Image: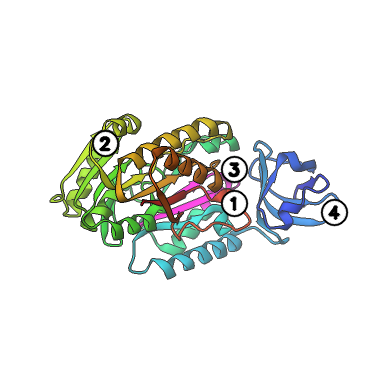
């Protein structure tokens, strides 16, 4: 008999539409003793079964639904879920890349679990108490499915505190791994720092957006802001850009970007790496650019940060439009969870208006295909990008 979450009247509607989260504010009462990571069931006020999943009374999200059925959540269940996720990636990665997301939390009906592949190494993140409790079983399933050389844990994210968990990092399976793993995507080569790099070692979610840049790059002068280790610029160089300027605050990241130029044999393309604050550097740039990429870190980690974040995005995009040539392209992104499409687009349009230039919106960009989003879980969509052109 599992603990039972009884909802307040009317609070079952999101779950009936397929949303996988139960918020603590929607709960009328809890029947049974509950510890972080337990399996529990959720019922409507009139006793209708709504789902089964991982409980955590310490979290604002008290239950993350794994299944709408009364089924056993054991090894067989999780192996089947993992196998389905792997099958999708095998169909879509063949011949394109050896680094991709294997499991994307709610998008693969495994809330709280992230797994990325870098060649023969898997990198795992357990974001919830429920997944933390079955981490060993998940690792065993991944080993049986992939036969990797290593499984490395990067559960070193601040959101674990909300689950009552400490950050964790280290080897879960295999022999000790080197700090950098060389990967390839669409013919471009990179060294991913899986031990201490951003995310799990690389920004896998921008893969298709980088490919788009490559198609636009021939003969162009490119400004790559918040470039990190230069992945966008490497695609630009492989697309025969004329010249490139990279900006980032990290000396280590810029050094790796230079390494990537050598690794991809495009050092012949004139380029410069500028270290410092992007906001300040953009104000002092003299050149005119054909393509500008704005891919900043999240400005709004909390909903209360939205006003200041909006000002930051407005400022960046305004300067980008001012620096663009006629016919130039802006690829601008937000990875702030709380920044909606509507608000982000309004900010960019406002910046375009203030720039005094005529701007076309050519399209939207989002996560790479290996980062699926549950259609009933819009919170899973965090990366928003717009392609704009100066008329």
Residue on which the image places disc 1: 378
- Foreground mark, 1 or 2? 1
Q: Judge from the rendering whether residue 187 lies leftward or rightward of residue 201; answer left or right.
A: left
> In the image as oriented, which residue stretches furthest toward the right?
46
Q: Are marks 4 and 1 in contact (CB under 8 Å)?
A: no
Task: Answer whether residue 169 is visible to the viewer in this image.
Answer: no
Q: Earlier in the sequence, mark 3 or mark 4?
A: 4
Query: Going 26% across and 53% down the picture, which residue do you hit?
Result: 236
Query: What colour scheme does the image use?
Result: rainbow
CA gap, disc 3 to disc 4? Answer: 27 Å
Instruction: Assess whether residue 338 is covered by the magenta stretch.
Output: no
Q: Nearer the viewer, residue 152 or 198?
A: 198
Q: Residue at x 26, y 57 (%)?
A: 188
Q: Is residue 88 above or below residue 373?
A: below
Relative to the observer, which residue lies in front, 187 or 268? 268
Q: Residue at 68%, 57% (x, y): give it.
A: 18
Q: Which mark is residue 47?
A: 4
> Mark 2 against mark 4, which lies toward the viewer?
2
Mark 1 or mark 2: which comes first in sequence? 2
- Residue, x 35% and y 31% (percent of image)? 279
Residue labelled with disc 3: 129
Q: Earlier in the sequence, mark 4 or mark 1?
A: 4
For disc 2, the marked residue is 252
Q: CA distance from mark 2 to mark 3?
A: 34 Å
Q: Earlier in the sequence, mark 2 or mark 3?
A: 3
Residue in the foreground of this view, choosing between 373 and 50: 373
- Provide the secondary structure element on which disc 2 rests: helix
Q: Position of residue 340 (x, y in %)?
A: 55, 45
Residue bounds of the magenta highlight: 111-136
């Amino acid at each position: 008999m599992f603990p039972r979450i009884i909802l307040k009247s009317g609070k079952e509607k999101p779950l009936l539409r397929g949303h996988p989260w139960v918020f603590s504010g929607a709960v009328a009462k809890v029947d049974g003793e509950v510890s972080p990571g337990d399996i529990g069931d959720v019922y409507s006020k009139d006793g209708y079964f709504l789902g089964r999943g991982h409980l955590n009374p310490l979290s604002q999200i008290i239950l993350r639904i794994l299944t709408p059925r009364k089924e056993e959540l054991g090894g067989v269940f999780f192996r089947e879920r993992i196998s389905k996720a792997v099958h999708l990636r095998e169909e879509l990665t063949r011949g394109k890349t050896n680094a991709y997301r294997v499991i994307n939390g709610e998008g693969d009906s495994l809330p709280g679990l992230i797994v990325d592949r870098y060649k023969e190494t898997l990198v795992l993140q357990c974001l919830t108490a429920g997944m933390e409790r079955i981490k060993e079983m998940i690792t065993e399933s991944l080993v049986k499915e992939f036969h990797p050389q290593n499984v490395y844990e990067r559960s070193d994210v601040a959101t674990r505190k909300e689950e009552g968990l400490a950050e964790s990092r280290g080897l879960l399976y295999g022999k000790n791994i080197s700090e950098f793993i060389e990967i390839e995507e669409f013919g471009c080569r990179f060294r991913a720092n899986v031990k201490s790099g951003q995310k799990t070692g690389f920004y896998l979610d921008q893969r298709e957006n980088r490919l788009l840049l490559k198609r636009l790059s021939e003969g162009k002068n490119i400004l790559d802001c918040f470039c990190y280790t230069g992945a966008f610029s490497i695609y630009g160089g492989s697309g025969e850009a004329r010249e490139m300027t990279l900006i980032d605050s990290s000396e280590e990241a810029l050094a790796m970007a230079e390494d990537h130029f050598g690794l991809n044999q495009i050092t012949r393309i004139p380029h410069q790496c500028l270290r410092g604050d992007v906001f300040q550097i953009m104000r002092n740039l003299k050149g005119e650019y054909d393509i500008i990429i704005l891919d900043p870190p999240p400005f709004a980690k909390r909903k209360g940060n939205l006003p200041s974040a909006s000002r930051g995005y407005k400022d960046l995009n305004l300067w980008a439009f001012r620096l663009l040539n006629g016919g130039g392209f802006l690829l601008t992104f937000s990875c702030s969870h709380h920044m909606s499409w509507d608000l982000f687009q309004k900010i960019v349009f406002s910046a375009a208006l203030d720039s005094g230039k005529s701007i076309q919106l050519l399209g939207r960009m989002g996560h790479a295909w290996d980062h699926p989003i549950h259609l009933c879980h819009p919170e899973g969509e965090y990366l928003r990008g717009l392609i704009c052109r100066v008329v």
